[in-house]
Image: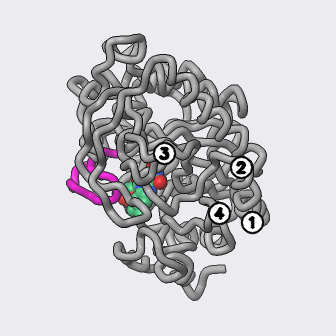
């Protein structure tokens, strides 16, 4: 029997089906980094009865920006726009959590307050480009966070969690994946610190665990999820013992009783499928984490059933197919053809490639 359309729980969130909308940066905010009417329409279109949406990554600080056009949650004026989104999703019978974001070194001075160098655990540069207001610019050399500056960054996550609550979200997800700041602390390729935030995994995991705790203090553990991308190479990431690193973190997050662990399979590099291999990461972390697991990365309607049946994941998040199929749960339920996505409209622009993908004729 198909498991995809059976209910499941992620912490206190009761969901009717196991098709989750993955976090998707689309860079269509309004001035002031606010969520506007177009963004609200996009999420409304992707709401399903009893379905879970994870918002696009949302910076908790101006220093957390690597992409101009991302809607923020770093000041109170941004709460109202997000409130229209959560109201719309709830009116459609869905649930939505906010993904809290800090890019760390994946940035450029043009995006930073005062034109400073971006922050990171260590001064090690990533390859790739930031999306500045003046176009793509190579990531710059970051400055290593001073030990005494780390509590302020943790507090930015705390404040983001407080504002997400004021905006009516159902919970928050810590973006610990894809080579952004928490991931930079976690992996030894990017963390060469010698203080209590560097060295052995117990120290490298400290930052992620502290920001997770900061969110738990606001929401309770049963409304906080964490996203990880074990062995992911996006953002020039590397670790000398990834199985141990991520196994340790998963066990620690399990001990915190978080609502869910969201695992990106390494066959995905950011937004691209780089191998046709079977999912491995969720299967591995399942041995260390007994709670709800959401798997992501390269899944299709057929391969979802296999991972659910194997028990390696409880739900699956879809990214690219949700962009071009706003009614994705309906399409999978009724075996309707999927609309292909257009990569050129992923980031920035207006409604084209954003809110003009149609629902299937037979969908509600
Ligand atoms: C346009 C685009 C934007 C993305 N933005 C985010 C993001 O904000 N946060 C995040 O954790 N992952 C982000 N991802 C990664 C997706 O959440 C997902 O892991 C990836 O697309 C693989 O899933 P898929 O094969 O179903 O597309 C993005 C992917 C795409 C295509």
Residue drawn 35% across the image and 32% down it: 143
Q: Which residue is mark 1?
A: 88
Classify residue 326 by image quadrant: bottom right
* Residue 275 falls inside the magenta stretch: yes
The secondary structure making up most of the magenta span is loop
1 vs 4, front mark: 4
**Mark positioned earlier in the residue sequence (4 or 3):** 4
Q: Quadrant of ligand 1?
A: bottom left
Could you give the CA–CA distance between mark 3 and mark 1, rounded to whole angstroms?
Answer: 36 Å
The residue carrying pointer 3 sits among few (fewer than 14), some (14 to 19) or many (20 or more) residues within 10 Å by Cα, namely: few
Quadrant, the C terminus: bottom right
State the residue position of label 2.
169
**Residue at x 50% of width, y 74% of height:** 325
| Label 1, label 4: how far apart the Cα atoms are | 13 Å
Q: Which residues are magenta?
A: 265-277
| Residue 303 can be seen in this image | no
**Vertically, is 360 above or below 98?**
below
Q: Is 175 displayed left or right of 361 in the figure?
A: left
Q: Earlier in the sequence, mark 4 or mark 2?
A: 4
Disc 1 residue: CB within 8 Å of ligand 1: no
- The residue carrying mark 3 is 114
Task: Tell whether label 3 touches label 4 (CB within 8 Å).
Answer: no
For discs 3 and 1, the disc positioned in front in the rendered view? 3
Classify residue 121 by image quadrant: top left
Q: Assign a secondary structure to mark 3.
A: helix
């Amino acid at each position: 029997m198909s498991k995809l359309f059976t209910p499941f729980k992620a912490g206190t969130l009761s969901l009717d089906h196991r098709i989750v909308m993955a976090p998707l940066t689309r860079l269509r905010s309004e001035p002031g980094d606010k969520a506007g009417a177009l963004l609200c329409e996009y999420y409304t279109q992707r709401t399903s009865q009893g379905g879970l949406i994870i918002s696009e990554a949302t910076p908790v600080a101006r220093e957390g920006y690597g992409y101009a056009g991302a809607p923020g949650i770093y000041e109170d004026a941004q709460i109202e726009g997000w409130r229209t989104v959560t109201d719309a999703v709830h009116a459609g019978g869905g649930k939505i959590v906010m993904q809290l974001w800090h890019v760390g070194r994946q940035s450029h001075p043009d995006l930073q307050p005062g034109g400073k160098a971006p922050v990171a655990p260590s001064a090690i540069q990533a390859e790739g480009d930031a999306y500045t207001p003046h176009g793509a610019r190579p990531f710059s050399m970051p400055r290593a966070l001073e030990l005494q500056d780390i509590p302020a960054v943790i507090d930015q996550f705390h404040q983001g969690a407080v504002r997400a609550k004021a905006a009516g979200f159902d919970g928050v997800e810590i973006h610990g994946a894809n080579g952004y700041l928490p991931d930079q602390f976690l992996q030894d390729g990017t963390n060469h610190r010698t203080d209590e935030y560097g060295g052995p995994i117990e120290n490298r995991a400290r930052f992620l665990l502290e920001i997770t705790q900061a969110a738990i203090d606001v929401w309770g553990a049963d409304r906080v999820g964490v996203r990880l991308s074990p062995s992911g190479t996006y953002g020039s990431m590397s670790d000398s013992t990834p199985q141990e690193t991520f196994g340790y973190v998963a066990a620690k997050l399990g001990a915190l009783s978080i609502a869910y662990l969201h695992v990106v399979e390494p066959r995905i590099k950011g937004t691209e499928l780089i191998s046709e291999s079977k999912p491995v990461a969720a299967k591995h972390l399942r041995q260390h984490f007994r709670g709800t697991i959401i798997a992501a990365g390269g899944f299709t309607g057929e391969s979802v059933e296999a991972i659910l049946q194997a028990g390696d994941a409880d739900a699956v998040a879809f990214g690219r197919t949700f962009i071009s199929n706003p009614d994705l749960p309906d399409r999978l339920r009724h075996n309707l053809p999927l609309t292909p996505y257009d990569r050129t409209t992923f980031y920035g622009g207006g409604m084209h490639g954003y809110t003009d993908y149609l629902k299937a004729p037979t969908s509600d």
